[in-house]
């Protein structure tokens, strides 16, 4: 089993920055890729960034150039640096782990609120 715990959310003004962290524990060898999803009120959860075990990254067009995903394998931690935040970035942000056999696991989420 894999456990994911997010931290780092909060309330920030538009234009500000936050850094989200996700610590993974458990059967880490079963993880192929890790990522960040977000879910705004009334909308579906969407993938916004992903990083594979080989270090390849993906960023959704809506966050490209503003958000950066990274990972510290020694600390079993993944990060999402959020810069130039906009009110429309307000959402619950979830850490995810894509396992070798296809299952995607999520953490409990951390709230990011951007005020205008």
Image: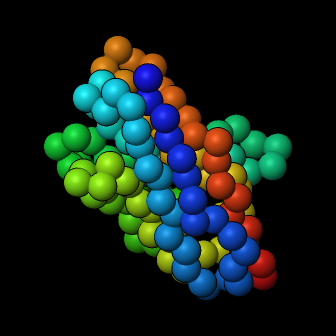
Q: Quadrant of the N terminus?
A: top left
Residue at horizontal 68%, vertical 46%? Answer: 39
Residue 54 lies, in percent from the top left, at 17, 43
Q: Is residue 24 left or right of residue 111?
A: left
Residue 29 lies, in percent from the top left, at 25, 29
Residue 72 lies, in percent from the top left, at 27, 57
Residue at horizontal 82%, vertical 43%? Answer: 42
Residue at horizontal 44%, vertical 50%? Answer: 23
Asked whether the viewer can see residue 18, the reply is yes
Asked whether the viewer can see residue 58, the reply is no
Q: Please determine whether, in this image, residue 101 is positioned above or below residue 77.
A: above
How is the structure coloured here? rainbow
Write down the quadrant of residue 107 in the picture. top right
Extreme residue toward the front, this view: 26
Extreme residue toward the left, this view: 54
Q: How many marks?
A: 0
Q: Is residue 25 left or right of residue 7?
A: left
Q: Please determine whether, in this image, residue 73 is positioned above or below residue 67.
A: above
Residue 21 lies, in percent from the top left, at 47, 59
Q: Quadrant of the C terminus?
A: bottom right
Q: Please determine whether, in this image, residue 44 is positioned above or below residue 7.
A: above
Extreme residue toward the top, this view: 101
Write down the quadrant of residue 35 in the picture. top left
Q: Is residue 12 left or right of residue 94?
A: right
Comparing 8 with 86, the one in front is: 8
Comparing 101 with 72, the one in front is: 72
Residue at horizontal 31%, vertical 33%? Answer: 28
């Amino acid at each position: 089993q894999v456990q994911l715990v997010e931290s780092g959310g909060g309330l920030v003004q538009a234009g500000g920055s936050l850094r989200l962290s996700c610590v993974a524990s458990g059967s880490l060898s079963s993880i192929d890729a890790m990522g960040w999803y977000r879910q705004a009120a009334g909308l579906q959860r969407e993938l916004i960034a992903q990083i594979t075990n080989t270090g390849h990254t993906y960023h959704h067009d809506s966050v490209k150039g503003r958000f950066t995903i990274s990972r510290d394998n020694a600390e079993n931690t993944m990060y999402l640096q959020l810069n130039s935040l906009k009110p429309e970035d307000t959402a619950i942000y979830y850490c995810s782990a894509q396992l070798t056999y296809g299952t995607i696991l999520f953490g409990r989420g951390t709230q990011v609120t951007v005020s205008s």
